Image (cartoon, grey):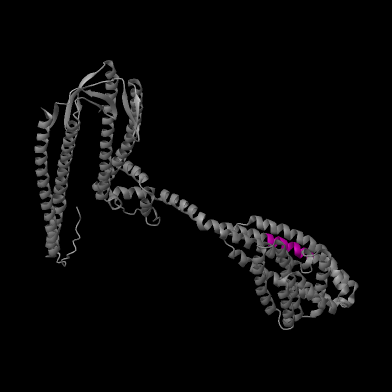
Amino acid sequence: MCVCILLESLSVAVPVDSDNPTMEEPTVKGTVTPLSSMFPAEDAQRAAKRVEDALSEKQQELNQVKEFIADNSNLINLVQKLPEELHHDIMVPFGEAAFFPGRLIHTNEFLVLLGEGYYADRTSKQTVEILNRRGKALESQVNSIKAMMQDFRAEASFFDATANEAAEGLVEIREEYVEENSSERVSDSGSIKQRSSSFSEADNNNVEDEEYARMMFRLDELEQEELAAEIDNEVDEDNQNQGNTAKSEEIDEDEVYARMMSRLDEFEQEELAAEIDNEVDEDNQGNTAKSDKESDEDEQAITDFDQFSDQIARDQKFTHSEELRSSKPPQQTKDKKTSEDFSNNYRRQQDFSDDQSCTDLTVQAVTRDIVKSSNADKASILPEVKENVGAVPSSKYEVSAESSKPGIDSSKVSAQTSKSGFDIQKAFTGSVVEHTPEIETSTQEQIETSSKPSKLVSRFKMQRR
Amino acid sequence: MDNYRQAKVQKFEEFVDRRLKPDLVSAIAERDKVFEQQKIFSDLRRNIENLEKNSVTSLRTMVNLGSEVYMQADVPDTQRIFVDIGLGFHVEFTWSEALNFISQREERLAGQIEEYTHLIASIKAQIKLVYEGIRELLQLPAERSIQEPIF
């Protein structure tokens, strides 16, 4: 039993990495680890010997210092005694191997070394003071040496104990100890491990997951809101359409349109998820909050303008179609250089629009990524540019959505409705409102585009760090 | 055979490390001591010659009391000088006697130095010899560029 206690103290004092081999096998219970394998007796003895050597060295140093102290006290006595007489008969050393018979004179005058080759003429009293100060310095030296020696002694006794135990072969007991406390130890080490790993990887993952969950939750909320808004719009449209029986085809078109939009949503969500996955190590709560705020604002604006734009669009639908289409690309180019690309894309997509909707979607996704990268590049330079550019892809997105729509049904009408809305809103409010007609896409797009550049910026910052 | 050779080499090396090298170190230390003595006596001789030349009859000097604390000392008569003749004996000499003794002493010390120098040379030669033996045992090619420790 006493051996067990010894071992416990030993295993506590042992460095952690040497403790681990036994601890890191939670599945195998009671691994046999003889003490001598971890601390070979010779090694322990060698270590003990080394410590002993250091100890003896210190002892010598201590003796020397003590000698100095004795000399110093003798000298103090001498210096105090010398002035008592006018002169003392002594043998005056002449070199190292010869003397003259002589005597000390001026017995109250001492020449004392202050250090660095400077000497001072001092009286007996003053000299004694100096010597006392020297004595104090020596005493402190002795104390420090003694403390060091104590440390060495503790170390030596520990090494000796280890060596003895290793030599005695405490194999089984060591094993038994591990077995008994293995569960506790393993759980401890496991928790520590978890904690440590959570600092490195799992924590990131957790944060990431958390963030992802938050994002997804937010997305769901937005979607529901948008869905509700859309339903309202549809109701409005239905009401309007009930008035206008001639536009009954519009309802079909809206349904198709809604279907397309939901699909777009799906794609977007997938992409969003992928992007969130990609952005692993970022902890941009501030960014998400910002994006949330922005999206909220956008939503409001969007819902406001949506009805308005729908109405206007419906009015202008048939009349201004050609005009608007012709007028649109220039307005897009107004935005920025990148918007030219988008208009090009738009044209291309319109070309493709009659063929397939799905291919357009994919193409659009790719272009959007490019846009994002460009956003990221510019975002670091100009925030205003970022705003504009951030708005542009959404407009382009609309365009593509529209262009995808025509593949199924009467293309130009719907495209123009959205376009007219786009133009008008732009005339009204500028950049923020540009992407009103497609609520879902625009808002989500906005989330992405608004959160994306900032995220990327922060990531650059991270990299710079 | 290989083991035998190994053991032999080890024995030689141990001989060099445990016997010859400590001997060499101690011999060098002894010779240094003698050098010191020689220096002391040559200094003393120079000092006495100085006193003679300047015909100094009384002397005032500083005496070290220990720990670099000095006090003035007066020597009223410099004619008689006590010189260490070894084993803690000091003999009272006049200047001429002292100088005579010092010259004899210096001769003796020079002889001692010679002795120690020979001793050191022989120890070094033995070390070299043993190294040569080790080299032969290991059948290494003889290298004329001597790469042994320099003492």
The answer to whether residue A222 is magenta is yes
Q: Position of residue A235 (x, y in %)?
A: 83, 67
Q: Which of A222 and B147 is in front in this view?
A: B147
Q: Main secondary structure of the magenta part?
A: helix
Please report the residue visible at 74 percent of the width from the left and 59 percent of the height from the top. Answer: A296
Q: In this rendering, is residue B8 above or below B107?
A: below
Q: Position of residue B99 (x, y in %)?
A: 12, 34
Residue placed at 15% from the left, 57% from the top?
B10
Q: How many marks?
A: 0
The reply to whether residue A252 is in sight is no
Is B51 displayed left or right of A215 in the figure? left
Q: What residue span does the magenta drawing correspond to?
A: A218-229
Q: Which of B56 and A208 is in front in this view?
A: B56
Q: Where is residue B27 in the image (x, y as percent from the top left)?
A: 14, 46
Verify whether residue A179 appears in magenta: no
Point out the image quarter for the N terminus of chain A: top left
Q: Can residue B76 be seen in this view?
A: yes
Q: Is residue A392 above or below residue A282?
A: below
Is A74 located above or below residue A13 in the figure? above
Q: In which quarter of the image is residue A418?
A: bottom right
Please state which of residues A114 and A463 is positioned toward the viewer in this rendering. Answer: A114
Q: In this image, B71 relative to A280: left or right?
A: left
- Which quarter of the figure has residue B13? bottom left
Outermost residue on the bottom side: it is A355
Quadrant of the image for the C terminus of chain A?
Answer: bottom right
Q: In this view, does B43 lie to the left or right of A299?
A: left
Residue, far front: B54
In x, y percent, where is residue A370? 65, 72
Q: For the point 22% across and 19% down, which residue is it? A: A88
Residue that protrudes farthest toward the right in the picture: A243
Relative to A45, B97 lies left or right: left
